[in-house]
Image (cartoon, rainbow, N blue to C red):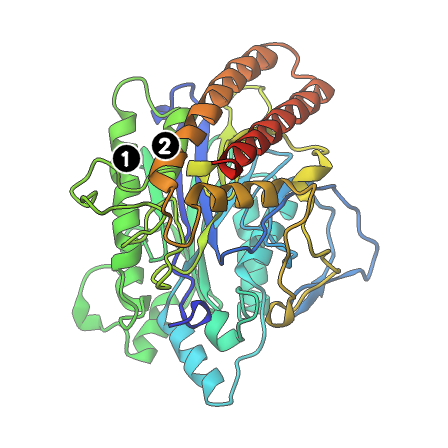
Amino acid sequence: MTQLDQRPWSCDSFVVLPAATADGSMLLGKNSDRPVNEAQPLRYVSARAPERGDRIRLAYVEIADDCETLAHVGASPYWCWGHELGLNERGVAIGNEALFTRDLARNQHAARAGASPEPGILGMELLRLGLERGRTAVEAMEAMIALLERHGQWGAGVPGASSADGAYDNSYLIADRSEAWVLETSGRRWIAARVRDSSWSVSNQATIRSEWDRASDDIADHARDAGWWGDESGGRFDFAAAYTDPHVPLQVSHIRLQRSRQLLRDATHGAGVDVAAARSVLRDHLEGTFLEGPYFNAARPDFLTLCMHSHPSGFTWGNTASSGVFVLPADNRPPHLWWAAATPCTSVYVPVFVGNLPEVLGHTGTPRPPSYNPEHAPDDVPVEGSYWWTFQQLLEAVKEDALGSAFVDRQPQVRAAFDPLETAWRAELDDLLEGAADPELLAAFTRQCVEQALATANGLLDRFAST
């Protein structure tokens, strides 16, 4: 099985409500898992005030650019207008996941039979549009819902794949300082639940069942008409039971989903979840569990883990391409993102604020034109002066070869170099935020951290090259 033949199995996100965090901030975490060598830079997008009649050309459709937008930062595949994860200037953070629904399966069958569905918005594009148009989590969600109902979702979310092979429906975690929502979609339909538990995790399967707050008017009728849900089922409509494609196995997502929930439950005991605990969830390879057998190597995984690595057999479809922990304080401290390029277990989280970023964070080997159709996107290539490619090359050096032969020895050396930096930066940032949180000082702090991260990564690359 080639990588292109596989479904995009991965991505994991979670949210922790303020009552369960160490400092009363909302926390949102996201691992973006993508094909190997699909660069995912981090960019700042400034606010804009479109003129009457302006349009936005997306990968497959063109939509009206009909409202003022919010500035934001977002991590995006090199070819994509949209984002995998992002944070706007009003403190709204969003992460998305691929969902495999019965509507998707029906559309894929039609496309392979020569009756391709009408093109729509990609999930990553919808995420960015929510960030641009939402001053709160609810406002972002409502903007996304309106666009989904109008334009639908259909198209390849994977470069080089056809729509039939690379399309997927989407779920989202959407949070601001005070509340968080889960939004799960199937074609043009959607269902949403406000998070009331101390934490919520999502992966590549529907998590909303019979407890939900808002939904498409015909969410149940559509399922009944299609024969996916019968009145004899009794009780309130169950979205996951009705819409999940029964031909897609859930074990690859269910283990990660349950592991995330377990780690968050454990972390809520005591002082509450902090940024360090959130990072440890995103770096997890099921260490310390019965699955860590004598032959386990996280860089040659026999199952998909929260921090994902490619397997030479093609069992996994890629690597974690970037990882983020969003901190949305309840007080007047500015919202921010701790962001790691490539696999977080071999990378370092740098603090980022919504504002101009160091240019090195946004560099890729292939410049992105105004719109790429992902089906024809050229491969990205390594390039000097790219933060993302530096950390992707560090991952490869830590592995040494496709079998990950050096990973067990070298990955602890990476952590010994990076963990003290994360600890020191967190302490420095706490001191900075106690003051007026001047945007220029915060931007300078981000630059300082990025420079230290690059210097440390390049030192590790030199060390591994000489051994």
- Residue at 50 percent of width and 31 percent of height: 348
Total numbered circles: 2
- Residue at 24 percent of width and 38 percent of height: 262
Residue type, mark 2 in image: Ser
User: Callout 2: few (<14), some (14-19), or many (20+) C-alpha neighbours within 10 Å?
Assistant: some
The residue lying furthest to the bottom in this view is 114
The tag on residue 323 is none
Q: Calculate the distance from the C-alpha at mark 2 to the C-alpha at mark 1.
A: 9 Å
Please identify the quarter of the rendering in which residue 441 is found. top right
The tag on residue 263 is 1
Residue 69, given in percent of the width and then of the height, sits at 71, 45
- Residue at 63 percent of width and 10 percent of height: 435
Residue 432, given in percent of the width and then of the height, sits at 60, 13
The answer to whether residue 162 shows anywhere in this view is yes
SS class, disc 2? helix
The residue lying furthest to the front in this view is 466
Verify CB contact (< 8 Å) between mark 2 and mark 1.
yes
The tag on residue 280 is 2
User: Callout 1: few (<14), some (14-19), or many (20+) C-alpha neighbours within 10 Å?
Assistant: some
